[in-house]
Image (tube, helix red, strand yellow):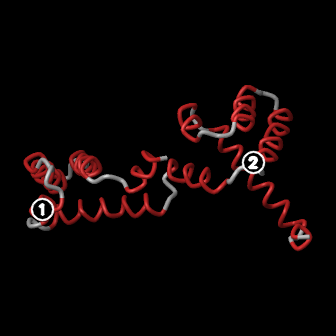
Amino acid sequence: MADDAISKTRRKRAMHDLQDLGEALVDLSTERLAALALPEPLGEAVREARRLKSFGARRRQAQYIGRLMREVDPAPIRARIDAWEGNSRAHAAWLHDLERWRERLLTDGQTLTELAQKFPGADLQHLHTLVRNARDDAASGKPPKHYRALFRALKELMPEPAADVEAQG
């Protein structure tokens, strides 16, 4: 009786969404696919879809994968793929936080001290050199080589929130 309350259009849309998620699984690397620990029939269907070259055969296999997806909870799979693709809100917030730190380091001399207090393991001499070189690059009109290097250094220093979840899952 519960299925009668849901319109046919909504059911079809849900099936297409599952099929699209299945196609995203087919596009994943072998390592990432293994990290998802999918049920065996679904994992086998995804591996089979990778092997197929014919458009019609791939389409039918995608429909089959969509049908198998009904038996699993798609939310964790979708969340993991979004995190890998950088679409998660936590990942975006982390990147914005890194950008704010970089801009503050370039404009305010006290920010390096604040960074040292927040992250005691930071290599302050290296960060100070990167900040100085990034300022020099900007002043002389050179390409932003050190500006990017500063961002990479901050990225290594500040752990990504989603990385903690990925290590547990």
Mark 2 lies on a secondary structure that is helix
Please state which amino acid type lies under the numbered disc 1: Gln
Q: Residues within 10 Å of mark 2 (few under 14, many from 20)?
A: many
Left or right: 143 with respect to 167? left
Determine which quarter of the picture holds residue 108: bottom left
Q: How crowded is mark 1: few (under 14 residues within 10 Å), some or many (20 or more)?
A: few
In the image, residue 123 sits, relative to residue 111, either above or below, namely above
Residues 58 and 76: in front is 76
Quadrant including the N terminus? bottom right
Could you give the CA–CA distance between mark 2 and mark 1, rounded to whole angstroms? 47 Å
Please state which amino acid type lies under the numbered disc 2: Met
Residues 165 and 145: in front is 165
Mark 1 lies on a secondary structure that is helix
Which residue has dot 2 on it? 69
- First in sequence: mark 2 or mark 1? 2
Which residue is at a point 27% across and 48% down the rendered structure image? 148
x, y percent for residue 35: 54, 38
Left or right: 37 with respect to 52? left
Left or right: 110 with respect to 84? left
Which residue has dot 1 on it? 117
What numbered label is drawn on residue 54?
none
x, y percent for residue 137: 17, 50
Is label 2 in contact with label 1 (beta carbons under 8 Å)? Answer: no
In the image, residue 36 sits, relative to residue 9, either above or below, namely above
Which residue is at a point 9% across and 67% down the rendered structure image? 110
x, y percent for residue 156: 27, 47
Number of residue marks: 2
Which residue is at a point 82% across and 39% down the rendered structure image? 59
x, y percent for residue 83: 50, 52
Left or right: 168 with respect to 127? right
